[in-house]
Image (cartoon, grey):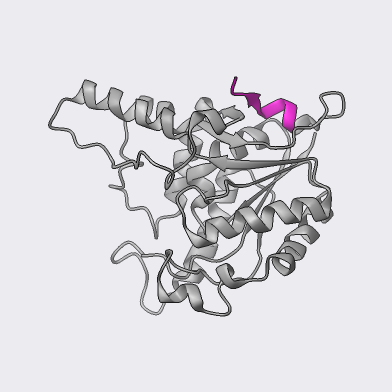
């Protein structure tokens, strides 16, 4: 068995991007660890969800632990940085936000956890952070450097397969008719990666409902009527049951970690 550490910017990012991978890893007997750079202090809470005086950061921290329980993760850690907000907002300039953290210093914090866990696979994000959020871009930078410092055998960059998603939306549009308005997916470099740049996938369709339960754990961010929570089961499984990764340095097959060979399949 092995250890997979999944590094994320904010609470709920693990649910949307990698929950299938994490649930599958845990179900196969591997150790799963979640690390968050921030507690999502600048998220927009669902109206009325917070109790009087309840801090969003405290609520979201608790939601991380509930999501971890659902997924079978054994450990949750926070690096202690503050949410930077969306790109271009004044909050990007706060000296204590994650976006402003020195990469080397933040990477050493993460590397300590990676070394403690004797990590076999680390998941981060692609170089644009999936959609250009500053904290997500910083996860890529910090995660890549931490993987180097800790000597992690595999660093897998989670990303959205833009071509896969666009094909799926076109198919749904055809099935549901002209009156149905699909979520807007940018057909450019601001969102995900083209299929030609993606190297691996994790097939986790059988864990789709676990993934959706992980999303529900983040109730401060996802109301019951959130479009991802109301998707019919087959549509959710088709669109979110396969997770995609870019792996720039693949391990030697003869010495590859078991968690790598157990979960990750070449895209081509």
Q: Quadrant of the C terminus?
A: top right
Inspect this view and state whether residue 76 appears. no
Q: Nearer the viewer, residue 130 or 216?
A: 130
Question: Is residue 246 within the magenta segment?
Answer: no
State the residue at coordinates (69%, 30%): 28
Q: Where on the picture, by quarter, is residue 172?
A: top left
Q: Nearer the viewer, residue 108 or 205?
A: 108
State the residue at coordinates (67%, 58%): 142
Inspect this view and state whether residue 113 appears. yes
The stretch of residues the image draws in magenta is: 260-268
228 on left or right of 64: left
Q: Nearer the viewer, residue 166 or 41?
A: 166
166 on left or right of 9: left
Where 25 sits versus 141, above or below?
above
Looking at this rendering, what residue extends furthest in the left direction?
179
Residue 230: x, y in percent?
A: 30, 39
Q: Quadrant of the N terminus?
A: top right
Q: Where on the picture, by quarter, is residue 236?
A: top left
State the residue at coordinates (52%, 79%): 94
Where 39 sits versus 158, above or below?
below
Q: Where on the picture, by quarter, is residue 183?
A: top left
Residue 228: x, y in percent?
A: 35, 41
Residue 36: x, y in percent?
A: 61, 59
Residue 219: x, y in percent?
A: 40, 56
């Amino acid at each position: 068995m092995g250890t997979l550490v999944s590094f994320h910017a904010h609470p709920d990012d693990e649910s949307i991007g990698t929950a299938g991978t994490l649930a599958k890893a845990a179900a196969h007997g591997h150790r799963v660890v979640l690390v968050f750079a921030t507690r999502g202090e600048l998220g927009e809470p669902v109206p009325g969800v917070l109790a009087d005086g309840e801090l969003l950061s405290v609520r979201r921290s608790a939601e991380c632990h509930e999501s971890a329980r659902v997924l079978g993760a054994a450990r949750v850690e926070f690096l202690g940085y503050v949410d930077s907000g969306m790109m271009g907002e004044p909050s990007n300039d706060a000296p204590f936000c994650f976006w402003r953290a020195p990469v080397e210093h933040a990477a050493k914090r993460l590397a300590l956890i990676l070394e403690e866990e004797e990590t076999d696979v680390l998941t981060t994000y692609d170089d644009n952070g999936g959609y250009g959020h500053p904290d997500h871009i910083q996860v890529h930078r910090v995660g890549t450097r931490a993987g180097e410092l800790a000597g992690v055998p595999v660093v897998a960059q989670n990303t959205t397969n833009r071509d896969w998603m666009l094909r799926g939306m076109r198919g749904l549009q055809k099935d549901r008719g002209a009156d149905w308005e699909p979520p807007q997916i940018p057909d450019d470099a601001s969102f995900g990666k083209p299929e030609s740049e993606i190297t691996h996938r994790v097939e986790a369709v059988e864990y789709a409902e676990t993934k959706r339960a992980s999303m529900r754990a983040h109730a401060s961010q996802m109301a019951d009527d959130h479009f991802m929570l109301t998707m019919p089961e087959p549509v959710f499984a088709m669109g979110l049951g396969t997770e995609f990764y870019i792996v720039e340095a693949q391990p030697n097959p003869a010495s590859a970690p078991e968690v790598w060979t157990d979960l990750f399949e070449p895209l081509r």
